[in-house]
Amino acid sequence: MATERDERAAKRLATESAEPLPQAVGPSSVTQAGKLSRVVVWFRRDLRLEDNPALMAALRAGREVIPLFIWAPEEEGVFTPGLSSRWWLTQSLESLSRKLEALGSRLVLFKTPTTKEGIVPFVKDNDIQAVYFNHLYDPISLVRDKGIRTLLQGLNVHVESFGADLMYEPWEIYDEKGQVFNTFDKFWEHIVNKMPYEPFMPLPCPVAMPKVPDEVKGNRASLDEVAIMTEEEAATSEHLKEKWMPGSDSAHMVWNKFLCEKLAFFKQEKAMVHSDCTSRLSPHMHYGEISVSSLYFVLKKMKLSLSTALDSEQQIASVDKYIKQLGYREFSRYILFHNPFTHERPLLEHLCAVPWQYDQDLFKCWQQGCTGFPLIDAGMQELWSTGWCHNRLRILVGHFFVKYLNLPWQWGLKYFWDTLIDADLECDALGWQYLSGCMIDAPPFSYIMDYEEECKRFDPDGKYVKKWLPLLARVPSKFIHTPWKAPAKILRASGVDMGITYPHRVVNMDQVRKSVKHCCECLEAQKCGPQRGPFRHPTRSDPSRPSSMRTGTADEGMDGPYLPGKTKPEKADSVGLGGVQSHISETDGCHNESTGVVES
Ligand SMILES: Cc1cc2nc3c(=O)[nH]c(=O)nc-3n(C[C@H](O)[C@H](O)[C@H](O)COP(=O)(O)OP(=O)(O)OC[C@H]3O[C@@H](n4cnc5c(N)ncnc54)[C@H](O)[C@@H]3O)c2cc1C
């Protein structure tokens, strides 16, 4: 089955796409010549034994199968996984290692500056005849994999790769004119209604594996020696164990629990930020501990049986909604595969001209959850302490970052990358492109969210804020999202001293509107934005400006984004957000109803 999948992909590649994705090598030589003596299955972000086509192909082809993992973080440049993600990887590899040992095999480990420096000598020294791996779609992996494939083939090593991360490969999906889809709705509509074939059925888990000969060694004997985290980093990540359990067994447990307890309410509850109604499978899925196909077929079967049951509309709608979430993940890979710059440049080119302000103080306020907007701060606190937050919060804090603080979305993307436990370049890039208005189906750049309205919709009683900002726990629900509106007596009774125990807002609505208006004018005039790279270390836009983190006077805390001809900001406590009554933006008067990609 895996072979057929790869052949189909290869044919498509040859006929429809000039993309740099590696061509699969036909397996005929392998089968005709009988079993190869020694082959490698190269694990990357597919840390599972079941539904793993590369592993299955290796087991079919080789008498000896060597499971290999290479840690080459330098190769990924600025996109080396962040601390929480590396914590996950370490635990997940431990779990995979144990599972391989239970089947009679073992994981061979390398730590090298580049993958090439690990795999090429290993293949030569150990007389490896074939290497099998599963596809990745981010630009860093694509370039690396293509290089490795060429090198290995030059050594007469058979190289074969498979799709295992998606329902459909990105080069299988085009519109009627053979064009790439650039809006989610059309992409998804095509998959649901027009794909002539289903995703592949999941493959079984091997029941045994050949022993890895003692003489076959990596350059590290254990995961401790690979040191994916330093000792200090490991010590500061201990708390993650309380919330998460990496590994494919755990992924299946989480999935089954979600199916039994939460899926039925998914459609209704998923948007509420305090509800624990989403699956939290994202870090498991990032490292490939559970396959999308296996989820899809369970959901499909469930939908079929629900269709004959009475009063099952709500449950069916929830199943469809969840399948659609998986669709966003597919779309993220599709977009980055076809636009390999998506993590760095806006998909809508003209947005390169946004005049961002590169303000380190505001960036820090946002990171540390000290913006003075409780829902934003609560989201950032949860993100920092658990490595995760709800999709809606990611949208809100991201939107706040881009529109309220006028900071470049690439900084936000990188911070998420460094902090999220489910950090995933494709999903991260899609999310930031969308909320920055860089996609065709996203709200336009002129759109400014109404903070108070969003709070009412997604955290109506302030439960979420009270949980993640316990300092505000005694503020009455009426003022929990807008403590600046609370009368002094109430604040005193709640134990809140604005500017001392909780910061004043770093920006007011007038400043936000002016800033977005100014950006839109620049865009309209097609003026060029600052010619600075997206990952430049942040610097203060105005070193003489007092830190907005200080808890001194209200004015200091309100010193918001730099604007040409900026006047002294109003005093924090006197500035309400009531001026923004709806999502109608001042700059284009556009009422945005868009559901868009990550709104889901
Ligand atoms: C700015 C921003 C950055 C993001 N960065 C990441 C990231 O680095 N890694 C990541 O996995 N997700 C990211 N997302 C998408 C989404 O927030 C998470 O996938 C989701 O919150 C994970 O929680 P869950 O597993 O409980 O989701 P569920 O609602 O249970 O969804 C199930 C699965 O569907 C996929 N999915 C759901 N929503 C999306 C979406 N909007 N885009 C892509 N896939 C989706 C995920 O794989 C998720 O695990 C980002 C979203 C935004 C707005």
Image (cartoon, rainbow, N blue to C red):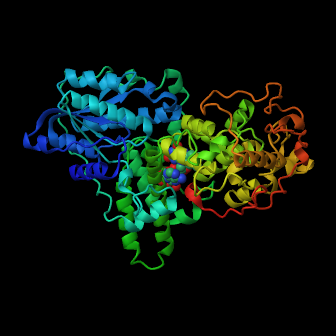
Depth check: 350 or 26 in front? 350
Q: Quadrant of residue 417?
A: top right
Question: How many labels were placed on the picture?
Answer: 0
Q: Residue furthest bottom?
A: 310
Q: Quadrant of residue 226?
A: top left
Residue 190 in the figure: left or right of residue 560? left
Instruction: Specify whether residue 321 is in view.
Output: yes
Residue 407 in the image, given as x and y percentages of width and height = 69, 39
Looking at the picture, does residue 431 appear above or below residue 546? below
Residue 453 in the image, given as x and y percentages of width and height = 74, 59
| Placement of the C terminus among the 4 image quadrants | bottom right
Residue 551 in the image, given as x and y percentages of width and height = 84, 33
Looking at the picture, does residue 525 appear above or below residue 257? above
Q: Residue at x 38, y 42 (%)?
A: 136
Q: Residue at x 22, y 32 (%)?
A: 153
Residue 151 in the figure: left or right of residue 341? left
Residue 287 in the image, given as x and y percentages of width and height = 41, 41
Instruction: Specify whether residue 281 is in view.
Output: no
Q: Residue at x 72, y 61 (%)?
A: 590
Depth check: 469 or 71 in front? 71
Residue 1 in the figure: left or right of residue 411? left
Looking at the picture, does residue 147 appear above or below residue 390? above
Depth check: 201 or 233 in front? 201
Residue 358 in the figure: left or right of residue 439? right
Looking at the picture, does residue 453 appear above or below residue 58? below
Q: Residue at x 90, y 43 (%)?
A: 570
